[in-house]
Image (tube, rainbow, N blue to C red):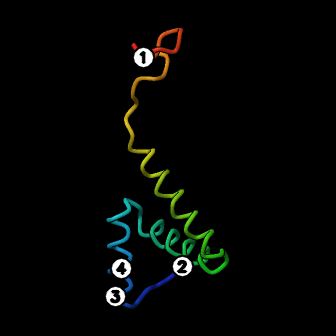
Amino acid sequence: MALNIKNDRTVELVRQLAAASGLSYTGAIDAAVDAMLKQRTLSPREVVVDQALAIARTYRAHLKEGPGPEELYDERGLYR
């Protein structure tokens, strides 16, 4: 099924969302519709938790690998 959006403002908003999120136009529309549907079906608390988890996933994806505990502590558990 194809959509033909004839509202210039809507098209511009989709472009902005796609650019800001790194998604395709279809991906941006999908994400926006999914978020809106979740807001309608989830409690306000669940919406906040869902948003916090999304922020955490984004943050985690941008973290660089650092030294693990075995590199920071010796066999007695003391800091090297």
Which residue is label 3 attached to? Answer: 9
Q: Would residue 1 appear left or right of 67 to someone viewing this image? A: right
Are the residues at dot 2 and dot 1 in contact (C-beta closer than 8 Å)?
no
* Cα gap from disc 3 to disc 2, whole angstroms: 19 Å
Which residue is label 2 attached to? Answer: 2
N-term mark: 2 or 1 = 2
* Cα gap from disc 2 to disc 4, whole angstroms: 19 Å
Helix, strand or loop at label 3? It is helix
Which residue is label 1 attached to? Answer: 79
Kind of residue at badge 3? Arg
Are the residues at dot 3 and dot 4 in contact (C-beta closer than 8 Å)?
yes
Query: Where's the C terminus, which quadrant?
Result: top left
Which residue is label 4 attached to? Answer: 13
Q: Would residue 9 appear left or right of 43 to someone viewing this image? A: left
Spot occupied by residue 42 in the image (x, y as percentages of width and height): 66, 74
Query: Where's the N terminus, which quadrant?
Result: bottom right
Q: Would residue 72 appear left or right of 31 to someone viewing this image? A: left
